[in-house]
Image: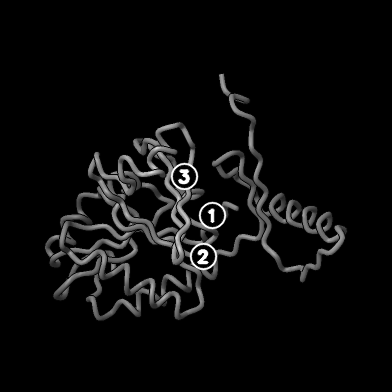
Amino acid sequence: MPIRPRLILAVVGEKSSGKTKVVEELVRALKARGLKVSTAKHVPEEDFSLDTPGKDSWRHAEAGADTVTLVAPREVSTIRRLRTEGLDLDEFLVLASEGCDVLIMEGFSSIFGTDPRVLKVVVVKGPSRAAEVEASGTIRPVLAFVGPGKAEGLRTPYLGFEELGELADKIADMALKRERRASLFLDRKEVPLNSFVRELLRKLVLAFTSCLKGVELAGDEEVTVLIRRREGEGKS
């Protein structure tokens, strides 16, 4: 069921700057703090594919399957064929978040580089590069820069790789303060709700569900309502 993460973070930066190292350390630190974490990796190569031409799964997709799921003894993988140009954040979250507390994306600066809903950690090769990025405004909002050396005169915190625990504490604190008790989705897009409507929706759904045979609720559950249109419905 699609649930928007409490916090969405993109780790961006130049090639070989240390983005994957930062993602790894943040995932470990946030998991140690009891948060559920999902990750996503942007692969910009146009002809990249996880599938192999000629394999059974590839033939399923070629025949027109919307998704193909591969189930192996130690992993389950789902492949969706779709164009990602102009990918909407809500659509992406349905595909990637899995109801996590924090979604950490590696890359995606070309897609969500200035999206205010996605916080960025910018990994740089030095303080001068951090100053250039901050001055240009091409990546925002920036939660922190991470890189070697010490920086002065920046408006944004500049941390060394050895200080990622401090960054994880800040991310965890932000995520825990963003409690989302109810969400409403129409197809793959989340419908904005004010606090009154959100709590009303939650109470109504829990009240109805608690009346069903065999259902026991604690009363503090989060609620997600997903409405799907029939194919072609609601489109001009």
Q: Quadrant of residue 202?
A: bottom right
Q: Residues within 10 Å of mark 2 (few under 14, many from 20)?
A: many
Q: Which residue is mark 1?
A: 4
**Residue 3: image x %, image y %?**
57, 55
Q: Is residue 25 left or right of residue 213?
A: left
Task: Residue at 27%, 64% (x, y): give it.
Answer: 155
Task: Residue at 15%, 62% (x, y): give it.
Answer: 16
Q: Which residue is mark 3?
A: 68
Q: Which residue is mark 2?
A: 101
Q: Amino acid at mark 1?
A: Arg
Which secondary structure lies at badge 2? loop
Q: Quadrant of the C terminus?
A: top right
Q: Amino acid at mark 2?
A: Asp
Q: Which is closer to the viewer, label 1 or label 3? A: 3
Which secondary structure lies at badge 1? loop
Q: Is residue 211 left or right of residue 116?
A: right
